Image: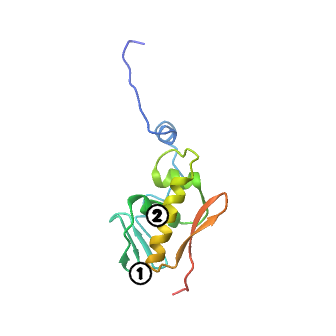
Amino acid sequence: MSGSGTVLMFPDLKSIRSVLFGEQDVSAPAPGAEVLALGRLVIDRDRQQVRWAGTTLPLTRTERAVLAVLAAPPLRVWTYQQLYESAWGADYLDDVSAVRSAVKRLRAKLRKAGATVALKSTRGVGFSLADTGPER
């Protein structure tokens, strides 16, 4: 070596793989999906808003991110690790408390708004989102 070089720093392994190998994170919602809708629930990423039946819900950035991940098609069960890495954008350190706390707050806010969408638990696996209301 000539005594000079370049040092690259990355926040996580996914970023390294993306730059070096062109790998994409297939678990994250599609980049073009700026507005997601599930029944009367509308998640507008551009405006950083979540609305239920036209009323804006007072959600934190993390709560909006968790809800956006869960609402992204196709609806499925997200493991704690997948949900954490997609919503928080960081490596999962096998601590379920952050995910459970965000889900608990989200459930309370959705319940208070009278929403018919529900965050369902799959014991030992993770969470999913379902519209439990009648079809309109």
Q: Earlier in the sequence, mark 1 or mark 2?
A: 1
Q: Cα distance, mark 1 to mark 2?
A: 17 Å
Q: Which mark is residue 136?
A: none
Residue at coordinates 42% horizontally, 73% vertically from top-left? 42
Question: Residue 128 occupies which quadrant of the picture?
Answer: bottom right
The reply to whether residue 57 is visible in this rendering is yes
Which residue is drawn at the image coordinates 59% and 63% (left, top)? 127
Task: Please state the horizontal and vertical placement of residue 87, each as a whole percent of the image.
Answer: 47, 55
Label 1 element class: loop
Residue underneath mark 2? 68
Three-letter code for the amino acid on which mark 2 is drawn? Ala
Give coordinates of residue 35: x percent, y percent.
41, 68
Percent from the top left, x then y, of residue 52? Answer: 42, 77
Colour convention: rainbow
The three-letter code of the residue at mark 1 reads Ala
Along the horizontal axis of the image, is 89 left or right of 48? Answer: right
In this figure, which residue is indicated by the disc labeled 1?
A: 53
Q: Is residue 69 visible?
A: no
What's the residue at 50%, 69% (across, down)?
Answer: 107
Mark 2 Cα within 10 Å, few/some/many (few <14, many 20+)? many
Residue 118's image quarter? bottom right
68 up-or-down from 28: above or below: below
